[in-house]
Amino acid sequence: MSSHPLLDSLAAPQQIRHFSLGQLEQLAEEVRGFLIDSVSETGGHFSSNLGVVELTVALFHHFDFLVDRIVWDVGHQSYPHKILTGRKDRFPTLRQHHGLSGFLKRDESPYDHFGAGHASTSISAALGMAMARDLQKQDFTSIAVIGDGSMTAGMAFEGLNQAGYLETRKFLVILNDNDMSINPNVGSLQGYLNQMISGQYYKRWRDRIEGAIKAIPVQSVSLRLAKAAKWSEESFKRIAVPGLLFEDLGFCYIGPVKGHEVGALVKALAEAKERMAEGPVLLHVQTQKGYGYKPAEKDPMKWHGVTAFDAEAGEMLTADAPKPAGPSYTQVFGSTLVELARQDNKIVGITAAMLDGTGLNLLQQAIPERCFDVGIAEQHAVTFAAGLAVQGMRPVCAIYSTFLQRGFDQVLHDVCLQNLPVTFALDRAGIVGADGPTHHGLYDLAYLRCMPNMILMAPKDENELRRMLLTAIYSNGPATLRYPRGNGSGAVLEDPITPLPIGKAELLREGNDLLLVALGSMVAPAQALAARLQQTENLACAVINARFVKPLDEAMIVHWARQTRGVVTLEEGCEPGGFGAAVSEALARKGLTRPWLSCAIPDQIVQHGDSRKLLDELGLSPDALFRRITAFHQGLPALD
């Protein structure tokens, strides 16, 4: 017998609109059970999805999302939404190659109205949908569901500001308040949200005062008291009223509502529907990340993103994969930063709500006064770092490659144009796997290479990462090092750390048939390829570890390009404007014409899946590279 009979009987989510309260509660219980069973098999985002089960069910009770529009901020809490919209049977393929995405995708379902993966976009997107509706004389409700972590980004308030100004009707923002993004939320806004919860008694106080004044029989006295009470009310509201900030922005505020009581949510959404006829509404819902699964309730950070686990025991399953040869790049970065910061009290670390993910938690533990988590606010993080640099500090911004895209203008305008000594440490550079196109770190080489004053480098192993971090911090200008997700090769970590000569590459192998110029994570594959080509094809390949994209070691590259019949560049970044383009431009400037094979990420969207499979599809696996380079060599003309 099925453990979720009501969920199994659901032919279409529109049926939920006719469910009784008891059925809604049963459905929520079954969705949570299915979620636990399914994610325990595949892994994926977990605690954030457990926290929105009741909210999702209540939303489908009130709205038809083939007509109405909903935008889930970030989208990693959309599993219940997917379960209820006909994708339950595809959950065994979650986040797998050619399988169900872990985020919302417009081409995956008509119920996914806006794709996401980065935070704080939902309000602006949902508002745009509402405006398009009004301009086209259509009729539907537009909803944004945003977490309190995402509210720390300025873009969320830009959307709120315009929605309130436009007095947008049939527009609902649901604030999912769980005190968390991935790490616990930071900043004064979080304190304000907590204060709002304590202000829930304000309405009761106001109603009692109004009732007492109306009961006074003398009208003149009653009017004077009412006027005085109104003045007192405005003063008191500043202290006690929940949601005054949102009211001042033009929203009708409802809440806080207990987010795991289906009845309370159904009632609050009914009220919101009524109020939306007059203007935008913000519904404040209190949830608990990991709700309904005790291990996740106790440690929501640990259970935010999980591998397969034993659902009954509450323990992660250990994979049979061989033990990695070396520590993770993240761990090496974090421990090296602590080491350097202990030697120099001007070094500070900055991250945007990713302490654990970037390794900056090690600095927070060791030197908390010089570690700053600014929340989901990459733009602020970069300009905050610029301000620190102006005053003589040496800031290190540790941000995922994909998330630094959100601070592009600040890197250029506030750091590079002023030539300030800010170091950017970009974790998760290259293919990241299951999180897919919104999280692959493919574009940093292209968009940072064009910025004046920027030094741009990538290490071949964990020891070179340590040397590059030291080099960047004391380069006296903007500098970036980018490194991949995962573990290093087990390289010996030198002590003390020595800096690298800026703009100098490393010759790893001599040869006169082909020149392989590799960057970062592609250096080890290039060395292996050279050995394989020598052994099987009798090709002598020179191999250069470029180290620096900018300034590029043009002298070494040009010298060895002259000795060989063709040049191959290897990088784990986008081909347009990337490292290979830099090498090609350098050869052209010297008037050197050589056939060139660019082994990079093609100009296309890279989907989610196992990293090895993705690299093979993109022509960057060891076997694919061997076939491409062999074919390239066979088509080369004789050397002049």
Image (tube, rainbow, N blue to C red):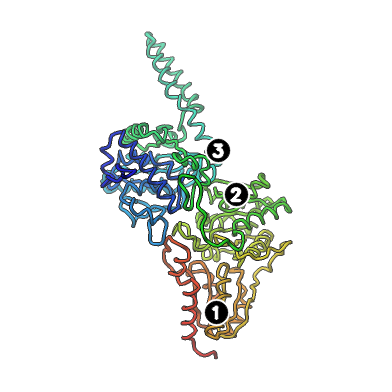
Q: Which of the 4 image quadrants contains residue 558? A: bottom right
Furthest residue to the front? 1
Cα distance in 3D space between marks 2 and 1: 48 Å
Q: Who comes first in sequence, dot 3 or dot 1? A: 3
Q: Position of residue 178 (x, y in %)?
A: 48, 39
* Label 3 SS: helix
Kind of residue at disc 1 = Arg
Q: Position of residue 212 (x, y in %)?
A: 41, 13
User: From this viewpoint, is residue 168 visible?
Assistant: no
Which residue is the site of mark 2? 384
| Residue at the (38%, 59%) spot, across then down | 99
Foreground disc of the pair 3, 2 = 3
Q: Who comes first in sequence, dot 2 or dot 1? A: 2
The disc label shown at residue 532, or none? 1
* Label 2 SS: helix
| Residue at the (30%, 43%) spot, across then down | 5
State the residue in front, 11 or 590. 11
Marks 3 and 1 in Cβ contact (< 8 Å): no
The disc label shown at residue 487, or none? none
Marks 2 and 1 in Cβ contact (< 8 Å): no
The disc label shown at residue 188, or none? 3
Q: Residues within 10 Å of mark 3 (few under 14, many from 20)?
A: few
| Residue at the (41%, 66%) spot, across then down | 604
Kind of residue at disc 3 = Ser
